Every structure is written in structure tokens, then in C-alpha cells.
Amino acid sequence: RYFLVGSNPAETKYRVLKIDRTEPKDLVIIDDKHVYTQQEVRELLGRLDLGNRTKMGQKGSSGLSRAVSAFGIVGFVRFLEGYYIVLITKRRKMADIGGHAVYKIEDTSMIYIPNDSVRVSHPDEARYLRIFQNVDLSSNFYFSYSYDLSHSLQYNLTVLRMPLETLKSETTQTRQESFDIFEDEGLSTQGGSGVFGICSKPYEKYVWNAKLLEAVRTAVHRDWLLYIIHGFCGQSKLLIYGRPIYVTLIARRSSKFAGTRFLKRGANCEGDVANEVETEQILYDASVMSFSTGSYSSYVQVRGSVPLYWSQDISTMMPKPPITLDQADPYAHVAALHFDQMLQRFGSPIIILNLVKEREKRKHERILSEELVAAVTYLNQFLPPEHAIIYIPWDMAKYTKSKLCNVLDRLNVIAESVVKKTGFFVNRPDSYCSILRPDEKWNELGGCVVSTGRLQTGVLRTNCVDCLDRTNTAQFMVGKCALAYQLYSLGLIDKPNLQFDTDAVRLFEELYEDHGDTLSLQYGGSQLVHRVKTYRKIAPWTQHSKDIMQTLSRYYSNAFSDADRQDSINLFLGVFKPAEGKPHLWELPTDFYLHHKNTLSLSQTRQSYTYWWTTGVLKHLPLPFDEVTCAENRRKLTVKKFHKYEEEIDIHNEFFRPYELSSFDETFCLAMTNSTRDFMPKNVGIDPSPFTVRKPDETGKSVLGNKNNREETVLQRKTAASAPPPPSEEAVSSSSEDDSGTDKEDEGAVSQRSTPVKVTDTGDNTKITENVVQSTKDVYGVNLSDIPSEDDLAIYARFVQLGQSQHKQDKGSQQFCSKYPLDKVINLIPISSFSQDNIYEVQPPRADWKSIEIFHAHIQAGRGNMQPLGRDDFLMYREYIRNRYM
């Protein structure tokens, strides 16, 4: 047998899974559902070790051996032989959302479960295993133990605010989970120590290991089930005069109709589209990390292929294969299914921003536009006008070629109108200052205003043909507009408006480009070809050669490696299940029948041509059906009653772990993608606000752009190194990781040439110093006069003598300070409760009577003389016992 021992982060509660290895093809897992303490687990493993050692007759060696240490179970998979277990063996913390850690999978391990003695080998097993492992789990797969990554922040926090009466009626109690040795004395009711915890079902569309966990979902406790998402997760820190604001970008890639660029186009028969990604930007004040008391805001937008039956034939080996419509769909059946899903998840209005070309010499992309317009027009006939789908066509490629039009200005206008219609989520009501001084744009904002803040209703759905380059730039502009409103709602800026070339927008642009590159690699096989700088027309000339290389890389990937990647995805997601007597995966001419279920069997229920939405959705619009309180949604929730001191819900203890020796590697393991420090000016005299517009030569990243500027910066750092640190030096740091390698090389080269210059009276050295050292105005922001005044010298002398004010001075120091008689100048009054308090000696203050009494009681307890316990002490002790051992 394999024994799988899992613990909570505090390592005080344990569960044990027993996996039988004698079955050659079946998976037999026993979960006793019992929660063990650390002592009980040690005793259990000790007994197993002793029993196995005696049975095997190996008295010298151990009966139990550790196979692997892991951070979670990805799932169980079977091809043609027995089952494998996939374990996460290495992880990296990528983000922190309200104290909940989001991890990236760094490495995994696949272990074959059946014993060698019962293994039935199959010749094709190794090939399936190799195809399965082509899905690189160490690239952009994410999980969290305590935060539901498949849902948006708005959903997660809305569920948390469900009425208490609803939760009490839904609480499911079993003897195992609700047993309390003090329940007869009414401790939980009298002390008010009951806390309701809610666990929602994940949104399966964005879960990538749902099929891998299917075999054990009903057999094991839900704590064993770890759901992973695929896409992107990045977090950056925005420092606003020292106040830390975390900007997080989470992209969830759909696991339905998933695949590579030319092999997955359009939609399948269930309304799932290719390359569908939900992008959520979360902004919160990191100085308070509780969901109940902190300030949190989020905005969600979606990208996805045009929801029609269409494809491109890649057998012609053309860079742009012709677009063909595969099926006629006069009643927009597949588009109706797709928009019905969106109405359920996001509410109304649904806004489509279509960026494909409108004017072409040869009809290519326009085919999709014409069909999409017809589908949206048809579906809108039956929706109420206030909830109609809004369609915005905009030929981005045409505007990019025009010299008269600024693409991003036009996109900014579209973004403003979109954000005003959908609103955004924030978990706190409008601040008092915004009520006193209301902004015009703020008053026009849409969404749903509730007592606890604002809700986003509706969503923007952006698409071009590939949903990569143009889409990413459009989403960045909408995200930038929403970011301004989010910052305004948290009281961090005075107007909901952000300018380009500010540190905040540069940081956000880097985050979005990382996001775009990652999603482009997953779907298209290369990084972005056209970036935000390309559309701003400020990209350097070297960017054109990089664009050509990315285009060639994308073409190569699409032509030669995409088919293998598609097979791997189909096998990993359980779209194809190997079986004896069926054709193998590599023998199939196409995977069309795997993704379109209606080709194999006719559906018994036919959707209405006019009432194309799910029953009940329209009644709650503009609110999304998934977030309203109704019986159907309550069935998706599991409610459990916890004790308020239980470690499972105590984020502070789980995050900081005060009961054990802290490790800096674990406490500070969060690897930020970027920080505003990377973009702040290197000259201290310039305003450090991240909302100040910078000139190109003022920002951190562009200062290090060429060699001459880099040398100047290095020399500036060297000359300013001996000066006392100015107040904002904490906000000044080196450039980001992208430039760090070249920085170090050039810095080393400069340091060999620029040895420290000793200033003497000779003219040559003075000239050298003038060339090397920048003016004090550039470095410190102020001009220093040549000779300080008498008053300034007296203040400086007083500052020098602070540490010696209550210490005997030797004669040398008295002679040194004879020009300024310090005894008459300095008359210090200690600002402290300590009577003696300086750098040489400290006399602690007298303890008050309460402290002395506690100390005496402690001494007496050590001698065995115990104080009588009061009622509060009994209650506290019972709570401690219950939390520790129950």
C-alpha cells in the first residue's frame, strides 16, 4: 500500500489516505475521514512501520520508506495499464490576495500505483505517458489552498456576505465534524464562538484537473481536492508615498474547447469558444490583508474566438490560411449558447468589441464580422432593450496604418464608455470626500451600487481573429481606464484618470505585456508580435527585427509542433480516453468528433430559437445569475461551522506562524513581477509619486537604456554613496530583472575605469571631479551654498554632540568644540520614560503594581502555589483544549 499523509499549514491536524497497490487496473482509495493530531499520526506510522518490518523479517531496516514529499495532488490518470498519481513536488508563491497565497507549480512527479508483481504491461503505455507529459505542468499552472481561483473576487466576496440565517439553515452537521466535548455546556452558543465557513464548488470551465480528480471526488474528503487553473498570474507593488498597493493580474484559460492556434477556431456545439481567457485585475491595500476589513477592488474582462462554426485549413502551408464557415447557423444556435453562459456568469450588458478588419481587397476577416453582426442582431430581437448585447466594431489595423489617427486615443474613448456601462467591483462604500466633491465621471458610472460597495454587472468581450496582439492592447487600455476608477474608489487619487508615462501606468503596462506574452505562447507558440509601444508608435527600430523573429517562430510552431501539443491537451483534459479496442490517439485523422458531442449522439432536448437563455437568468438581470441567492446556487455551497479560534480560519497564525522559528526564505518568498521602484526616477529631487508624468530621461528603466546614460547613473550612485540617505531613498532601487544582467556587466566595466577620485588643490583633479560629479541640484533637489551660516554650524554641532550630551567629554573634544561653547547651547530634556536613556547607558523605568502582581503570580505558579481559576479562565482553557485536540 501507499499511505498518503496530509497536514494543514500549521501541522497540527492530519489526514491519511490508503491507496491499494494490489489492483492492476482499478483505483482503490480508502479515506477514514478522521482528523489526526501530530502524536496520533506518529503512533499510526510507527505501528505500520513495526508491523511491516516484522512481516518482512527486516529487523535492521525500516518497514516504511518515504517515496516522495509533495505539496498537493493534481489527480489520478489511467491509460491502458494501471493508475498513476500526479503530485506537486515543487511550488513558488506568485501572489498574495488578502493573506491567501497563490502558488505556481514548479515541478511534478508521476508515480505508478500498482505493484510490479501485478502489473499488466501494454506496448503503447509508454507512448501515452510521453504524450501526457508533453503538457508541461511547470509552465503557468496555478493553485491555492484557501482561495478559489476559478471564480472572480466579486463572486468569492459576495458569497461570503450571504445572510447568516441562510447559512444556519444550510449547515450540514455530521457527528465526525461537529462533535464537541463542551457542547452540552453551551460554550459555542453562550460565548458566541461559532463561525460559519463556506466552500463553493469551483467553476469547472476554468479548472484543468477536473477529469483527473473525477475518480476520487466522491471517495475522499474535500480537503484532498486541489483545483488548478492554467493561464497567467502576476503581482506588482505600487508604492504611493510608502503605502503598498498590490496590483494583481489573473488570467484563467478555459479548459473547454482548449487547444492551439489553427487547430482550435470558433466554437463547439456547446457554446465554448477557442482561446477563451477571463482576465481579472485585482487592486488592494496590502497594509490590511483581511477580506472583511481591507479595501479590495476588481475588474473582469474576457477574450475569446468569434462564437461561430469556422476554421482555417493549415494544409496549404500559407501564413494566413483562408477562413471558411463550416456550418450555416441561421438561428445563431452556438452564439446563443455562448452568450447564455456569459449572462449567467457576468450579468448584463455584454459588450462585444470586435477588432477584425472591415475593409479588405480580398474578403478574409470580414467574413467573421458579417456573420457575427447577423447573429447578435438576431439574438437581440428577443432580449429586453435594456439588457441587449452591445456590439462595437472597430477596425484596429486600418487605424494603425493611418498617420492622422492615434489608435490608443480612440481606444481610450471606447474604454471609458465600456467601464461606465459595466462598472467594477469594490468592497467598500464611496468615501466621504468623493460624496463631498463628486466627480462628473464617477456619477455616470454604471454597475450596481449596494450598501457594501459596488458590483460589476456585465462584461467586455474582446476579439480579433487570433485574440492575441490587437486584443491584448485593447484589453490593456480598458484595464488602464478601470485601474483609474479603482484607485479613485480606494481614495488614492483625486480624479479617476491616469496618464501615460507615469510610473503606475508603466508598471501596469509591463504586467499586461507579461500577461499577453504568456497567453500568446500558450495558444500561438510565440510571444506578442505587436505591443502597446508599437501602437503608440514609440517602439525602437530594433523592435521590428524582433517582431519578424516572433512571426517566424509563430509560423514554425503552428506548422510543425501544434498537432503534438493538441494531442497532449486532449489527453490531459480527458477529451480522449484510451481504451482497448478503440483507435489510438495518434491514429485519429481529426479531433473534431471529440470536441463536438452532437456528431456522435443527438441531444434529447432542443433549445428554443426565441427564448435562448436559461430559465431564471432574465429575472435577475443586470445581476449575474450565479451570484444571486437562490435555492439552485445554495446547492453549490458547502457550509460548515467552525470555532472562532480554529487554525483553519485563522489567517494571521497560518500566514505568520508565530509558534515556530521563522525562515526568511518562506516569509518573503513572494516573487513580485515588478515594483514601482523599477520605474521611479533615480534623481531624488523629482516627485516620487507614481502618478506624475515623467519625461523619457527621468524614469528608471529608460535612464538605463543606453550605455552613456547607464555610466552616468553608476557614477552618480558612486558619488552619492557617502552622503546621508534622503527621505525617499527607500523608494529608489535598481532596474527590473530584465535589465539586471547587462547592468552588472556595465557597472563592473565602469568601476574599473572610475576609481574613487580624491579631491586636492591641483587644477587637473578639480576638472575631473567637475566632469564626474553631478550638481547638487540634480542629486539632492536643492543647491547647497558654499559656506554654511553661523546658525547652521551651531545646529550641526549640536547634532554631533547628541550622543555625548550626558557623557563625560575628554579634553580633546572640549578643545575641538571650544569655538562653540556647547554647555551653554545644549540643554536636553530626555523625551522618554527611561530616566537614563542615551547611546551609552539605559536605566529601565519602574514597573507598575499590575505588572509586579502578574510577575509574583508567575513565580508562585512555578513553585506549585496555583491561583484559583475564574470562569473566564475555564472558558479559555476549554476553547484551547477543543482547538488543540478535537
Image (cartoon, grey):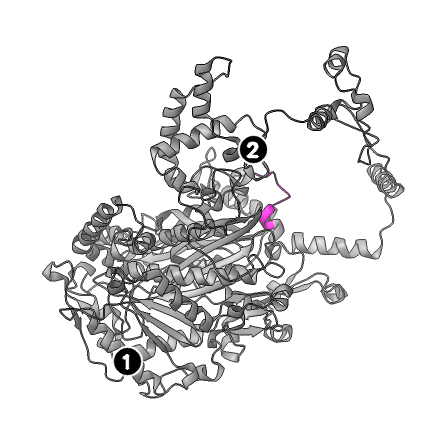
Quadrant for the C terminus, please.
bottom right
Q: Which residue corresponds to mark 2?
A: 783
User: Viewed as shown, does residue 244 lie left or right of 514?
Assistant: right
Magenta stretch holds residue 655: yes
Give x and y (percent) for residue 745. Answer: 36, 29
Between 392 and 2, the one lying in front of the other is 392
Q: Which residue corresponds to mark 1?
A: 375
Q: Secondary structure at mark 2?
A: loop
For the view shown, which residue lies furthest in the right direction?
A: 849
Q: Give whichever of discs 1 and 2 has the lower sequence position.
A: 1
Q: Which residues are magenta?
A: 654-662
User: Viewed as shown, does residue 520 lie left or right of 458?
Assistant: left
- Classify 532 as above or below 609: above
Q: Quadrant of residue 19?
A: bottom left
Give x and y (percent) for residue 226. Answer: 45, 57
Query: Closer to us: mark 1 or mark 2?
Result: 2
